[in-house]
Image (cartoon, grey):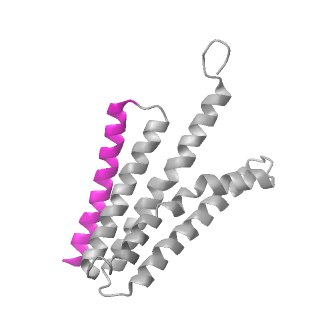
């Protein structure tokens, strides 16, 4: 903030960066996790450990790809890249991996809940979609959005999640 109470361009950029870093990757990672669950769920019976590893490793690979794209893009734009900048990109993109953790935990814990494979897939899918809605709402809130805009972004992400669920229904029936 400047002395007049107005946000400076730098504080606005920093706030936008924090909002993006904290949530955008989480929205993307949740959608990615839901897609992995759908893909695995259409194959029939499979070991739960396989799905847990698939969720976490896919999240990690996409995280690496996003870090590479950001670093490579900065290099192409001839911005200086030092260790601090690269670590900042790694941190900013980490929510992609974090978003895979709740569905993976659900899959890992599903035997303790007495769930079969089908119920496990549906519960993990619901958790991934809920994460997607939650990350998008958090991004809007951190970005200073109105309640109405937060509701709109939650609704859009819920519709996107429902599309993924519709694809599962179409592929398995």
- Residue 41: where, in percent of width, then height? 32, 78
Queried whether the magenta region covers residue 52, the answer comes back as no
Quarter holding the C terminus?
bottom left
Label count reads: 0
Residue beneath the point at 39% across and 43% down: 137
Queried whether the magenta region covers residue 162, the answer comes back as yes
- Residue 104: where, in percent of width, then height? 43, 71
Query: Which residue of the protein is positioned furthest toward the top in this rendering?
Result: 4
Quarter holding the N terminus?
top right
Write down the region rendered in magenta.
146-173
Query: Which residue of the protein is positioned furthest toward the left in this rendering?
Result: 173
Residue beneath the point at 31% across and 38% down: 151
Majority SS type along the magenta span:
helix
Q: With respect to residue 80, does 101 lie above or below?
A: below
Instruction: Answer with the quarter of the image where residue 48 lies.
Output: bottom left
- Residue 162: where, in percent of width, then height? 27, 58
Q: With respect to residue 15, does 78 lie above or below?
A: below
Residue beneath the point at 61% across and 22% down: 7
Residue beneath the point at 36% across and 79% down: 40
Q: With respect to residue 115, does 78 lie above or below?
A: above
Q: In the drawing, does residue 73 fall left or right of residue 168? A: right
- Residue 70: where, in percent of width, then height? 65, 54
Instruction: Answer with the quarter of the image where residue 147 lies.
Output: top left
Q: With respect to residue 121, does 12 lie above or below?
A: above
């Amino acid at each position: 903030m400047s002395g007049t109470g107005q946000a400076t361009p730098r504080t606005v950029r920093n706030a936008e960066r924090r909002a993006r870093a904290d949530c955008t990757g989480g929205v993307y990672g949740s959608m990615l996790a839901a897609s992995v669950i759908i893909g695995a769920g259409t194959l029939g019976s499979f070991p739960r450990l396989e799905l847990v590893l698939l969720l976490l490793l896919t999240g990690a690979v996409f995280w690496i790809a996003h870090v590479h794209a950001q670093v490579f893009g900065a290099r192409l734009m001839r911005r200086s890249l030092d260790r601090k900048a690269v670590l900042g990109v790694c941190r900013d993109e980490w929510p992609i991996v974090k978003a895979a953790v709740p569905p993976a935990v659900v899959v890992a814990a599903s035997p303790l809940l007495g769930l079969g494979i089908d119920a496990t897939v549906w519960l993990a899918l619901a958790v991934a979609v809920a994460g997607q809605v939650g990350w998008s709402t958090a991004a809007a809130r951190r970005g200073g959005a109105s309640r109405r805009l937060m509701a709109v972004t939650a609704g859009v992400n819920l519709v996107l999640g429902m599309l993924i669920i519709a694809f599962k229904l179409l592929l398995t029936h």
